[in-house]
Image (cartoon, grey):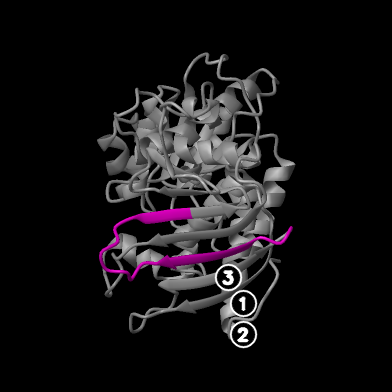
Amino acid sequence: MATESNSKHVGRRIRLGMVGGGNDAFIGGVHRIASRIDDRYELVAGALSSTAEKSRASGLAIGLSEDRIYDDFKSMAMREARIKDGIEAVAIVTPNHVHYPAAREFLKRGIHVICDKPLTSSLADAKKLAKSAGDSDALFVLTHNYTGYPMVRQGREMIESGELGQVRVIQVEYAQDWLTEAQDFKQAEWRTDPERSGVGGCTGDIGTHAFNLLSFMTGLTIDSLAADLQAFVDGRQVDDNAHVMMRFEGGARGMLWASQVAPGNENSLKIRIYGDKGGLEWAQEDPNYLWFTPYGEPKRLLTRNGSGTGEAAARMSRIPPGHPEGYLEGFANIYSEAADAIIAHRGGESVGKEVMYPTIDDGLVGVQFIDACVRSSSRNSAWVKLG
């Protein structure tokens, strides 16, 4: 996670472009809403679809000027980098296989990139994109949005301060049911196509979220893993269920379950973290609460922006306790942290350590995680290192 930017330096709105996210794309609308919640961005340009006709229709539908609607991301990057008041940042919200070529075009022109996860569809592309980001002066932000939830930040703060002691055991799961049978609509089609999603299906789509969440909250570095992946639906070419055991540097152990064939689960991301002094439990579907159990004492319920929570949770909260905040607000927190970094970058400034967002490094580790899971499962769940 990065530590860049200063929220005091707000200035004018950041001029934002978007690649992907046309009329029939769920995640594009989410990104647009998230970018607007704190009024830090203005969407001014886009290449919103894989065809010129759809891109134009989508751009007009969301109010873009005709001369700022592009047929493809390359022409958009080239022109926006040249014109006065061109975009300062671009949100890339395409299927996974487009992330690398699109991000590369904007990075090499000094345009900041805000990219959906996973980083790329292959480890080779992830490594090339990491190099491109390293060679560019532009910032790279990956939207692992669950790290923006207030009570996730609270848990991280408690672990960093030693309230759990030495972390020993982590259990994380992300279960959905929407791919329990074969589906033929757009969001299902590309996610189950290895040419577009990459070699990891469920592992890449939601397993990376679970892995990133445990890494963010605990600060642990994975040493090795053993994975058992399944494609339960007949004819499916990528996994739809994954069981992963993990060993971490320092001796902690973890288990990760990701599934998109678990009836009764809509978006059930949960994490349990246990140390020698206590434990934490958090569930995304009830995000305003964090259970904390000091060893030998009764379980305590901590609430978002309530008594017992610290600065890390408070700065991610917008409204008083008892008023629910959730998915869109957590997503918006990543956009606002990115905005702090971009605005600081305008003046060559640095930011406080409290400003955190997933970076290219988090993205690379996420794709290494997918690759290691696939390699391990192909070897009868052998223990493998991330590479």
Amino acid type of the residue tagged 3 in the rendering: Met
Q: Quick one: quadrant of the C terminus?
A: bottom right
Q: Which residue bears the numbered disc 3?
A: 245
Q: Is residue 354 above or below residue 267?
A: above
Q: What's the CA distance linking mark 1 and mark 3?
A: 14 Å
Give the amino acid type for the residue marked by disc 2 in the picture.
Arg
Q: Are marks 1 and 2 in contact (CB under 8 Å)?
A: yes
Is residue 312 shown in magenta?
Answer: no
User: Could you tell me which residue is drawn at 30 percent across and 29 percent down?
Assistant: 322
Q: Are marks 1 and 3 in contact (CB under 8 Å)?
A: no
Provide residue 367's location: percent of width, then percent of height: 59, 61
Q: How far apart in space, not on screen, are marks 1 and 2 (Cα)?
A: 6 Å
Mark 1 or mark 3: whose residue is earlier in sequence: 3
Q: Secondary structure at mark 2?
A: loop
As drawn, 153 above or below 314? below
Q: Which residues are magenta?
A: 250-271
Residue 238 location, quadrant: bottom left
Q: Which circle marks residue 14 in the picture?
A: none
Q: Nearer the viewer, residue 165 or 58?
A: 165
Q: Choose the circle earlier in sequence order: 2 or 3.
A: 3
